[in-house]
Image (tube, rainbow, N blue to C red):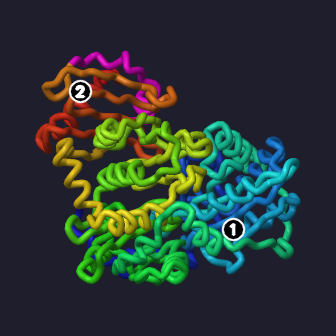
Amino acid sequence: MTDRAGTPAQESDLIDVHALVEAYYQKVPDVNDPAQKVVFGTSGHRGSSFDAAFNETHIAAITQAIVEYRADQGIGGPLFVGRDTHGLSRPAETTALEVLEANGVHAVTDQYDDYVPTPALSRAIISHNRALKPGGRQADGIVITPSHNPPRDGGFKYNPPHGGPADSAATSWIADRANELIADGNRGVRRSEPSAVDSYDFRGQYVGDLASILNLDAVKSAGLHLAADPLGGASVHYWQLIAERYGLDLTVVNPLVDPRWPFMTLDWDEKIRMDPSSPSVMASTVAKLDDFRLITGNDADADRHGIVTPDGGLMNPNHYLAVAIQYLYTHRDGWRDDAAIGKTMVSSSMIDRVAGSLGRRLWEVPVGFKWFVPGLIDGSVGFGGEESAGASFLQLDGQVWTTDKDGILLALLASEILAVTGKSPSQLYSELTAEFGAPSYARVDAAASKEQKARLGRLSGDDITATTLAGEPIIGKLSAAPGNGAALGGVKVESEHAWFAARPSGTEDVYKIYAESFVGPEHLAEVQAEAKTIVDAALGD
């Protein structure tokens, strides 16, 4: 934590949006520089035009690669295109539409030229494909967003016909083809001025469909005085329509949109970031708490949520996931009796205890929401959640809602929980800790070279030679997820009352250590210290 964390942004913190956009068009990447190549992480390609990492050249090549990929896969329906409020999102959308037009792809943008949250685009794809008649052509989509990243960044993500994040096979193909095109001077990219592009009412369709997944009548009847902070992101106009459509006493506490984000408080590292799970980012939102029964926040593309309650302040994302799971699996009669609880391997083991008390199967997968997609589609997974404040769940009738994270949905669920139970999510979490114990959870980073990160990504549980963890016998050494057998891309070590997981960072020369202890904060510190020793020994350092 730095001195200015949680304090209002100053003029010196703000980007020059004109210069950012100018760099988007003027800088040409060098594909021989790894930092300037197209690289798809778990949430698409991200970077800044200032660094020649997110420029017109990149977006034209990526879009052309997507065109070729969808043709190879036989995807011939509309391609939904949505953007968030970042300064690079509009230029990237313009470039993408030019490439799609030249290639004869049926692109569909927002009817009101509005911002499009990630969950609204996922919902549009699912709704279109669900209504297809035999022989109909499936839709897919592009989301232009770097999510909660700083204002200088841009992001570009492809969602195939299932509506969720593309898997690694698809993103690797798209990234490789895009880099080939860039290396050849983008001579294989077709572009033309877009003619009239078809439109879709993302906002109206998404908001209207909320009645199929939430009990908003209960929220209205309870008369709860609520607030939502879009944090300058794509959900800004959605919240007002939600309040009007469902008769909720809900105030949008910050309806401003400015690609510099001058109204934000700084994150832990003194950067402007729209992470609604960060206490520093949410400091100004939390300050409004006295006026409302519940305040929620979303990031720039609204796939993440932050929950603020009068009795608990900003909830830890893991705490809220546990409460949401406990509530949903006792208030959703339309779900399959065998619908599993999905969690990532670095989420709190409080969820394991809740799953056990509910008699539900726990489906534990590697980091990345894409792993939940098949289960959400067929209803075998009722809820899928990540430790980084991202989740989605099934409709009241057990059908799929979105296959991407939905921060608006999880924020509204907190209101339903309060209305139906009469207790805030933080009060309900206190009841869980009284029953199962109070875990201490944290993530820290440890320095690692690129070679060390590569070795960590290939580690097997058998490479861990330690037999104890912070005084307890080790009972599990995992390098693959129990739920689906997919590689963790690191290792997870478990004892009876604690665990840690170590994974290489995709963007920095560090590896991430996630750890949790049900013994207490001091024991957690021991777990973290021993985790680094255990991992370094396995890496041969």
Horizontally, residue 175 falls left or right of residue 455, namely: right
Q: Position of residue 425 (x, y in %)?
A: 29, 61
The residue under the point 81% across, 72% down is: 197
The residue that mark 1 highlights is 93
Q: Nearer the viewer, residue 459 or 536?
A: 459
Residue farthest toward the left in the current orientation of the protein: 522
Label 2 secondary element: loop
The residue under the point 49% across, 64% down is: 214
Quarter of the picture holding the N terminus: bottom left
Is residue 521 part of the magenta span, yes or no? no
Horizontally, residue 521 falls left or right of residue 540, namely: left
Q: Please, what is the three-letter code of the amino acid marked with disc 2?
A: Ser
Per the rendered image, the range of residues in magenta is 446-467
Q: Earlier in the sequence, mark 2 or mark 1?
A: 1
The residue that mark 2 highlights is 495
Quadrant for residue 226, please give it: bottom left
Label 1 secondary element: helix
| Label 2 environment density (alpha carbons within 10 Å; few <14, some 14–19, many ≥20) | some
